[in-house]
Amino acid sequence: MINDLWILATASLVAVSCALVGSFLILRRQSLVGDAISHSVLLGIVIAFLATDSRSLPVMLGGAVMIGLLTAWLSDSLHKFGKLQSDASIGIVFTLFFALGVILISLYAGQVDLDQECVLYGEIAFVPFDTIVWGNPETGVDLGPRALWAIGIVFLIVLISILIGFNRLQTVAFHPSLAVSLGINVVFWHYFLMTLVSLTTVASFDAVGAILVVALLVIPASSAYLIAKSLKGMLWLASAYGLASVMIGYAVSYKLDSSISASIAVSAGGLLLATVLALEIRKRKRRLQPNRPVGI
Amino acid sequence: MKITTILKTVSMTLTLLFTSVNAQAQLNIVTTTGMIADLATNIGGDQVKVTPLMGTGVDPHLYKATQGDLRKLLRADLIFYNGLHLEGKMQDIFEKMARKKAVFAISSELPQNRIIQHHGQHPDPHIWFDVDLWMHAGDYVLKVLSKTLPEQSALFQTNAKRYFAQLRTLDNWVKQQIESIPEQQRILITAHDAFGYFGQAYGIKVMGLQGISTASEFGLQDIKQLKEVIVANRIGAVFVESSVSPRFIESLVKGVEAEGHQLTIGGELFSDAMGLPGTPEGDYFGMVRHNVETITRALKGASNQ
């Protein structure tokens, strides 16, 4: 029972963190940056391994965060200074990094089992087993899952950043030219957001695996985008969609004995589909009743 | 009247419950691969109930856990895993679980000088293809089982003795089979380097297109080198593996044929997982026998032409 709670808590924190940064990504049309980071971290892992000759988690995480930041920053810079489309610049950076990683592996580490699946991506089902123990490993106090702590800290950073920078992030997202004339450092806030994205994705990869992170970055925020009337509303709705996907998905995986992360991702997709359908039905109903007063 | 019937039903239900609990008094063992499950079943006999996490044809490098796997691990009395990084990131989890639960790596007491090391400190995990080394792993399983259920240790000893005798016969048979291949043709070419221990134990040179990890890609140099070896030694067959996509090996065959050398695919070898339960290849014996027969038939057949 306690194990189910640990899993649900970790997944929920991942879902809300991803929903919050994902909402800004959607507005900036860069939602696939998460997917890009999931590939380009290979380069970070390989470089970290070649530099330290170790496959331990802190080393791998360090390499992944660095390359994650670089991916986000570079694709943003290519878009801004190289005048390329934002989707194209993301595609260029992550394929380049991934390919560099593959070349480095075949040059220097061909005989070692080294890929992000095996050394970085976590499995949410095993979150309860990987706990932090205070003091002696045998007798110390069990402080709960390591992944929960990591994603909890990242969640707090994301939450506080958005609370503090909400007005600026909002102006930058919707009225970039107004932001410039108001004297807001637009470049700083862009890179600030990308740093949040990179932190969130890498911490979540370690906790729950790649596919779930990519899904939770894009899908709940998209569902929220369809119905929200304001940025604040969108952030709340995206978090709610993320949490609902976690709960439904976990129930599904329990019932079907399936992969937890895949079930949560599918549930998020199901909720998006339901939202699209509900909106469509409402639109048709309105068309059939032209005299009905327009309300929300 | 009514009360007695109710009492009767209650007592009957209780007896039923009790007997079903009693019938489940077997030691509940969870293993990662099918090969380890096979080992634990043969030594534990009817005192154990063994469940492998990775099913048929599952590549351990790419295994995905389900919600049920979590429950299986929680309910297990004893967990065996391969170790040597075969289970990837899961190994960290097992090492942490070992603080609170009975979790053991079957490779933990193998003779160090027989572990193949890549790049200094990165061991090759595919220990099961050296039958003698696998018996060492079996010794460890026996030790753990006897410690867990001391009152059954005599039975485990008998089971292990009988099973190890069979493995010894198998080991000798494999040696004979491989020795029957002409020396020049004793080169085994497969999709990835899962057969390092097999080569070391039985004197057959092993070459792979991919590295250890099934996710890494191969380079043009690798293909060129392999082609040269194949043509120079007049090797007639290369092999595909059950848990790795065959397209890499197929493209190698096409490449060599383009140079006018006759090369066939010698058959499918079981590398990281065993065959379907119920088929001859569904247990460790059948898997090894299938691999060795496939290898000798293909390599000898080619040299007779």
Image (cartoon, grey):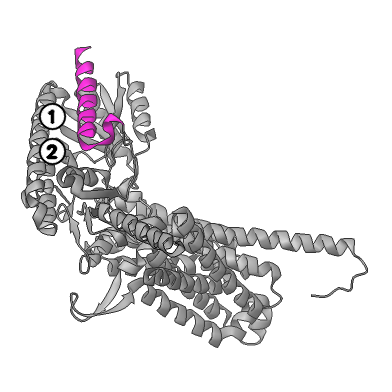
Amino acid on which the number 2 mark rests in the picture: Val
Question: Residue B225 or B265: which is nearer the viewer?
Answer: B265
Q: Can you tell which mark lies on residue B81?
A: none
Relative to B282, A191 lies left or right = right
Percent across and percent down for residue A61 are 34, 68
Q: Position of residue A42 (x, y in %)?
A: 37, 58
Q: Which residue is mark 1?
A: B174
The residue at the far top in this view is B305
The reply to whether discs 1 and 2 touch (Cβ–Cβ < 8 Å) is: yes
Give the prevailing secondary structure in the magenta stretch.
Answer: helix
Residue at 23% x, 55% y is B25
Q: State which chain disc 1 sits on.
A: B
The answer to whether marks 1 and 2 sit on the same chain is yes
- Is residue B142 visible from the viewing direction of this image? yes
| Relative vertical location of residue A247 with respect to residue B128 in this rendering, above or below | below
Disc on the earlier residue, 1 or 2: 2
Q: Is residue A207 left or right of residue B172?
A: right
Direction right: furthest residue: A291
Local packing at callout 2 (Cα closer than 10 Å; few below 14, some 14-19, many 20+) is: many
Residue B89 visible in the snapshot: no
